Image (cartoon, grey):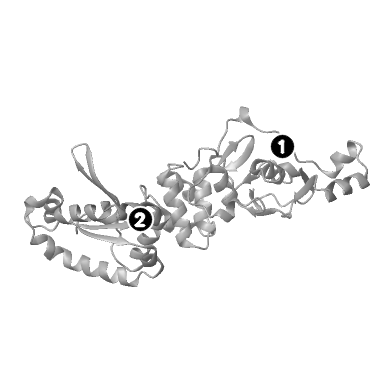
Amino acid sequence: MPGDAAFAPMSEATDPRWVTPEHLRTAGWSRAQMRAALRAGEFAQDVRGLWLPSEETDDLYQQCAAALATQRADAAISRRTAAVVHGFAWLPEEWKRPTRDIDITVARDDLTRSSRRGIDRRIADLPADDVVVWRGLRVTSPARTAVDLARFETSRVLAVQILDGVLRFRFCTREDMQAVTARMIRVPWVRRADDRIGLAHEGVDSPQETKVRLHIVDADLPHPDVNLRLFDGDVQLAQGDLGYWRWLIWIEYDGVEVHLPLRMDGKDQQKDRFLARRGWEPFRVTKADNAAPARFLRELNAAIKEAPARIAAMDPSRSPEVRHAQALLGLT
C-alpha cells in the first residue's frame, strides 16, 4: 500500500554516509588516492561537493541527506522528492529514478547558496506546520507536498491524479491542503493549486478514473459522483467508479488488469444486467475511450439529456434508486 515504507521513527534514522574531499584529506587520503577511488567507482558525486559510497547512491535517504548537507539547516526536501519520500500513490516512475535531482525548498531569506548539480532548489516560505521530520531529515508535510505539486506540475491531469491518490490513501485531508494554501499570501500559482484541489475526490480507485472524470468536466458536462455503492442493508450489492445518482447513469473504467478476467468469466456482463434491471444505464470506458473520448462524451451527453424522461417512465418499485431519482425530479 502506498506510504507503508515511507516514514520511520527517528530512532530508526540512518547515519548519513556522505563525505567531502576535506573529510578524506583529514583522514589522510592523498589527492591521488581520491582520484583513484573515483575512477574505481568507490564513490559517486551525485551532489556537487559531496561524495557518496557507490553502494549508497541508489538510497533515497542518503541522497536526501547529502543534498540537505549543502544547504542551511532550515531547508527541507520538497515537491517530487518529498512525494516519493511520503510514498504517494500513482507517481510517475521517473520520479523514483536514483539519478533524479533532489528537490529542496529553502527559506525566503536564504540567499547564501545557489543550486548545485544534483539539486533542484527553490525559495519559498516554510512555516513550521509545513515541515515534518523523516529519519532525522526535514521534509515538507504531506499536505504542503501535495499543494506544491498542484502548484508547479504543468500537467493538470497528473496533478489531480496525485491529489486523488493523496485523498484516497489518507495522506492528508482536503482541509489540510486548503489550510496550506490559505497561508500562501502572494505566492505564485496558489490559485491553480486551489482549483486542482477542488477537482480532487476521495474514494477514487485508479488514476485512469481521474482521467475519465476530467474528460467529463472538460466537456462542460455536470461533475459526476464518485465511488458509487449500492447496499441492501449492510450488504454491498455493487460498486462503480463514477456516475450520476440523479440520472441513474453508472460509469466504470475497464482497466485490463481488473476487468479482462471479469469480462472473460461473464461477471461484468452480469453486473451490467443487474444494474439495468434496477434502472441504471451502465457505461464502460476503455483505454481507447480515454485516449480519444469524443464518442463516449457524446453518448454520455445524450444519456444525461434523455435521463429525466427515462426515469419518469419507470415503475418506482423497480429499485430504491429509481424512487430516489424520481423524488429528485419532483415526480413523487
Q: Position of residue 97 (x, y in %)?
A: 62, 52
- In the rendered image, the vertical position of residue 255 relative to residue 56, given as above or below: below
Q: Label 2, on which residue?
A: 260
Identify which residue is drawn at 83% across, 48% down: 40
Q: Are marks 2 and 1 in contact (CB under 8 Å)?
A: no
Numbered disc 2: secondary structure: helix
Q: CA distance from mark 2 to mark 1?
A: 47 Å
Depth order, front residue of 164/299? 299
Q: Position of residue 174 (x, y in %)?
A: 41, 47
Residue 196 visible at all: yes
Q: Label 1, on which residue?
A: 16
Neighbour tally class for label 1: few under 14, some 14-19, many 20 plus, Cα within 10 Å: some
Residue at the extreme top of the image, as rendered: 11
Kindly identify the amino acid type of the residue bearing the numbered disc 1. Pro
Location of residue 128 (image quadrant):
top right
Q: Which mark is residue 108?
A: none
Numbered disc 1: secondary structure: loop
Kindly identify the amino acid type of the residue bearing the numbered disc 2. Leu
Q: Quadrant of the C terminus?
A: bottom left
- In the rendered image, the vertical position of residue 322 relative to residue 8, given as above or below: below
Q: Position of residue 110 (x, y in %)?
A: 69, 49
Identify which residue is drawn at 74% across, 51% down: 113
Q: Is residue 240 left or right of residue 12?
A: left
